[in-house]
Amino acid sequence: MTDAQETAADSPLRTTGGAPPDDVEAAPLPLLAPREGIPPVVVDDASLAEVIAAFAAGTGPVAVDAERASGYRYGQRAYLVQLRRQGAGTALIDPAACPDLSGLGQAIGGTEWVLHAATQDLPCLREIGMLPTRLFDTELAARLAGYPRVGLGAMVENVLGFVLEKGHSAVDWSTRPLPEPWLRYAALDVELLVDLRDALEKELDRQGKLEWALEEFAAIASAPPPQPRKDPWRRTSGMHKVRRRRQMAVVRELWQTRDRIAQRRDVSPGKVLGDAAIIEAALAIPPNVHALSALSGFGNRMGRRQLEQWQAAVDRARALPEAELPQPGQQVAGPPPPRAWADKNPLAAARLTAARSAVSALAERLNLPQENLITPDTVRRVCWQPPAQTDETTVASALLGYGARSWQIELVTPALVAAMTIKRV
């Protein structure tokens, strides 16, 4: 054990998971290594079986984290899964070598999982057979408790008094073998998650917000898998510059070609062709490879064969009949953008202004972010098309229909009723 480990292990923060005594001004301690060292990465069925048995026999919540290779690989797959549980220690599992972790998921499925920013990790964990029935999200708990900085490093430092190294968060986790400093970083991410969970639970209980948090966690755990986004090419960065339908067709063809190539090569789409280059080509609609090569993003480092495949996509868009060109704007269910309300429905615009003000004041009084008190989209929908009879019962029913939780409905309904009783002008 290193000197730093001994210092950390002897700290009252380490053993209690609480804050230092009120009369002690403790400097944050650097957390340099896991208390039991870095475990070997699990890469075979026999080692995985040992981990499953150990975690099934452990006690208390399970800290869970996952590392992806965003910006390097196609999709959002997990390339390392980290877990920690009392009695089992820490485990690091390579999902590339052990792609089916359903046995582990079943072994700890009924246990509370502790994650930081759970909605970021749950999709990739679901892909490998891991999904909790109960969870505690330390980032969301921190938001509800009113902490201004809710990243894991900030929370561990501010609440537990330890400094976590965060230098490897954006590395390529598909690298094999994973360097030891990266593995140390990954193990430390789950080292204090349960301690942080316990401290935040106490703070939420002190503020009278624990039941709110539990409702939020239950909603996350029971949420269905997200549906694929319709027309994802419309989210190309810089799309606001593209106005003509033929240009939109170029964006679509280039985006879809890029996506197929990225998927086949298992690389991030941005490494195949940048969004800026797609927009440049859409605005110019080059008639040939020579014209395409003169555009930004299609320059000297791109070979003739690559240029020809991009020009072929442009040519397909140029050849489309008018009836097959994409329509301007994406059809979105729900109200129009708020900036258009004053012209389309002045009374709804007045309701929205009043509702936003009321929600903002309430959130400030409760010391939590407005978007956690009630989602902006829910407020817009209720204000755009309020119940015919506006009272607390009907507004509460509308909020429930839009997915608001009971604690949100109880707090927000009176404010929204007041906002929506604005008289017609």
Image (cartoon, rainbow, N blue to C red):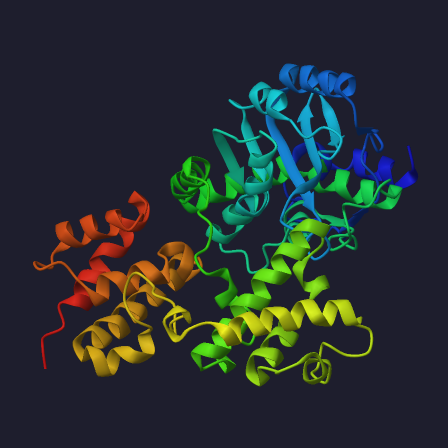
For the C terminus, the image quarter is bottom left
For the N terminus, the image quarter is top right
Residue at 19% x, 77% y: name it. 345
Residue at 21% x, 71% y: name it. 351
Residue 213 position within the rendered picture, expressed as x and y whole percent measured from the top left: 43, 42
Residue 279 position within the rendered picture, expressed as x and y whole percent measured from the top left: 58, 77
Residue at 41% x, 35% y: name it. 222
* Whether residue 237 can be seen here: no
324 on left or right of 239: left
Residue 399 position within the rendered picture, expressed as x and y whole percent measured from the top left: 25, 52
374 to 290, vertically: above or below: above
* Whether residue 143 can be seen here: yes
Quadrant hosting residue 6: top right
73 on left or right of 387: right
Residue 383 position within the rendered picture, expressed as x and y whole percent measured from the top left: 22, 66
Q: Residue furthest right?
A: 2
Between 7 and 346, the residue placed more toward the observer is: 346
Between 381 and 72, the residue placed more toward the observer is: 72
Between 237 and 356, the residue placed more toward the observer is: 237
Quadrant hosting residue 105: top right
Q: How many marks?
A: 0
